[in-house]
Structures are given as C-alpha cells and as structure tokens.
Amino acid sequence: MTNKFFINRKVGVISIIVAILAGVIVGCKKESFGMNYEVSGLKLKSNSRVLAPNEFEYFGEIVKCQEGELIWEKQLSLIIEDNLLKDDGLTLNSYRYVRKINSIDELEKIKSAIISNAILPYHSSESLELIKREDISNELKPVLDSLKPILDSLIPVSKYYVIDRTTTGRQPFQCLFEAGDMSTVELEWTYRGEKINTTALVSEKKGIVYDHLLYFVIPVKNKKKNTDASKTVVHATPRLKSGSENTDGSFNFIFSHSGYAYNAFGMLIWEFEVHCEIPYKKTNGAVSINGCNNMHKESYAALGFSCVADIRKKGIVTGVNGYVDFAWAYGYGTLVSIAIGWNGSGFTVSGGGTHRSGEEYVNSHYLGM
C-alpha cells in the first residue's frame, strides 16, 4: 500500500542495514556517574556539567524548565517554536498526552505497535524522504528493547551507561527508567502538506525517550553547519631575522577532520575526529621535519547510529628533505554498521552511511612553500 507521500519499500531503503547495536555507546573513560565525561577520549559537544532535575540539553545548550513544566513538554514546545525541520518539508504541529505506562507488559505492547507503524527518514544529499517500512522490526527492535526498568543489579558507571551485575553487559543509561515514569504522547506532523501521526515515549525525569522522527531525523541546518567540518591549518611561532624577508622558527602543521550532528530534539548522535600534527623548523629557507605528534582518532555514536574514524602513519623521514605519509578515514550513518579496514596501503570503509578516506604526503618542500 502506497499513499501520495510515503515511499513503501521492503528492501534496501537505507543502504546495508545491519546490526543496529553497532551504535551502542562504548569506551567511556570517566568512571564517576554524572560527572564530566569523555567517550573514547573525545571531549563531546554535549555540555559536561551535572544537570539539575529541571534541566536538559538542546543542541549543546542547557535549557531550564519553569516550575511545574515537564522536560518533554519543554522539548516539544521548542521543536514546534524553532521549526528546524521546515527546510526538510516536515513540521511538528502539536502534541497530545495519551497515558502513563503502568507495567512492563503494557510497555511491550506499545513498543510492538510503534514498530508495526514504522515511518523512518531517509536522508539523501538533496532532501528528506519519509519511508514506511514493513520489514523494519529487526532493526528497530534492539533500540526499543534497550528500554529497561532500573534494577538493583544495575551499576551506573558513567553518565552514559551502566553495567548489569547479572550479565556483565553494558546498558545505555538513556534508556533506563523508573516505574511509573514513562508515558505515551501522540505527535501530529505535516509532511509535504499531508498530516501524519507518530507515538512518542517520554519520561517525566528524562524528557523525550523515543519517536521515529524525533530520534532519527537530522535537521538540514544542523547537517550543513555541523557535520563533516574539516580543516588543515598551520600554526607558527616564528623567530624573525632582522633585515631578512625569510622567516625562521619553529612551526606546527596541523591536519584535522572532524564533525558532529544532533537529531531533531537536540541530542548529540555522533561525533568524530582524525588529527595529526607535524612539527618542523625553518632555517635560512631549509625545512627540517622534527616528527609526527598527537596523531589520534576519536569517534562516538548514540544508540541506533554508527560512527567510526581511523588514522595511521605509513612512513616518516625526519630532518631536511623529510616527509610524513599517513592515511585517514571516517564514516557515520543512521541504522547502519560502518567498518573501517586496512588493505596494506590505505583504508577501506564499508557498511553504508557517509564516509571519506584519503592519504596525505606532507614533505619539506610543501611546508617550505
């Protein structure tokens, strides 16, 4: 069944959809729950200070609710007011509180109904398409199955995940809830002139938990402005020679590709960086490479998303007429499992999503220009 604004496909809509659990948050370094945190060494765009019970993060900024105002109500009001999805042809018009979820059995029935009415976004380079999927349960079920009640066996070990004593498995903290804290809210949208409705799961203490569109839609402005920013710059601290046009001194060549993105309700969904620094000296016009410092890769992905990054040194010769040769790659996407492999001379990226790779050969001649 296809209507005028949905594309109904059973296979291959989002390229190479595989294990969604590849997006589970991993590698948290800070061990104190609720404190400043890092993921795989990457300082997140997310604000690091401990939030008050009436505060939440919205596109990296802290928002405070008024007395008596629930977090999810404030979030939805901001989404309607800011209308960040209008360039995608999608508008959230209104919301209606439905009911509190009183048991695990009731939650399971609601999750099954949400999966059976899955409407998911497909982001092309030009536009957003909403796609009604009939075969999406294998991809969405792990996301919704991550919603768990807080048990005595769960140990919070960071702001983002806990460990279950009984299974030693990690559990994303964003998906845990207390009994009686979760409810359903009906959302009314307009997409290209047509009305559609989705069901959102919300928490009085945590705000929006899940909705197909709020969770997976990435606003156009956010994509263009924040994702895949890159730079290759040179920072110099020269020592000038009196009466000479030549600039001698110590310099630092910096290569860095980085990017991040938020979803429609302002949650950070991925972030990456590949970085390398090459210190060198210039003396009477001759360039001497001192080495290769601070080469690192960082990546983060929220549940349901994938983000990977890698950088590797291939060769280095220091001194005059020296060089540094290195390869790099990164990838990110929604409902995909992206992997980076090494073929002996460079990186390959598989699994769909958006990805880039390349090789840089930085020699003394280039640095002396």
Image (cartoon, helix red, strand yellow):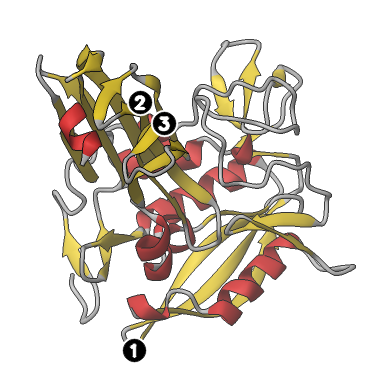
Residue to which mark 3 is pinned: 249
Q: Is residue 302 above or below residue 85?
A: above
For label 1, the SS is loop
Residue 6, image x, y percentages: 24, 72
Q: Residue furthest bottom?
A: 193
- Report the residue at 32% width, 31% height from top: 309
Q: Does residue 367 appear to the left or right of 184 in the view shown?
A: left
Which residue is label 2 attached to? Answer: 281
Spot occupied by residue 51 in the image (x, y as percentages of width and height)? 78, 47
Q: Earlier in the sequence, mark 3 or mark 1?
A: 1
Q: Find out whether the residues at labels 2 and 3 contact each other: C-beta distance under 8 Å.
A: yes
Q: Quadrant of the C terminus?
A: top left
Residue 268's disc number = none
Indicate the position of residue 220 as horizontal and vertical percent values: 37, 69
Mark number, residue 193: 1
* CB-based contact (under 8 Å), mark 2 and mark 1: no
Counting other residues with Cα less than 10 Å from the Cα at mark 1, is it few (<14), some (14-19), or many (20 or more)?
Answer: few
Q: CA distance from mark 2 to mark 3?
A: 6 Å
Q: Is residue 132 left or right of residue 75?
A: left
Q: Where is residue 114 drawn, in percent x and y?
A: 45, 55
**How many residues crowd around disc 2 within 10 Å: few (fewer than 14), some, or many (20 or more)?**
many
Can the viewer see residue 12?
yes
Q: What secondary structure is found at the residue carrying circle 2?
A: strand
User: Label 2 is placed on what type of residue?
Assistant: Lys
- Image: 249 above or below 15: above
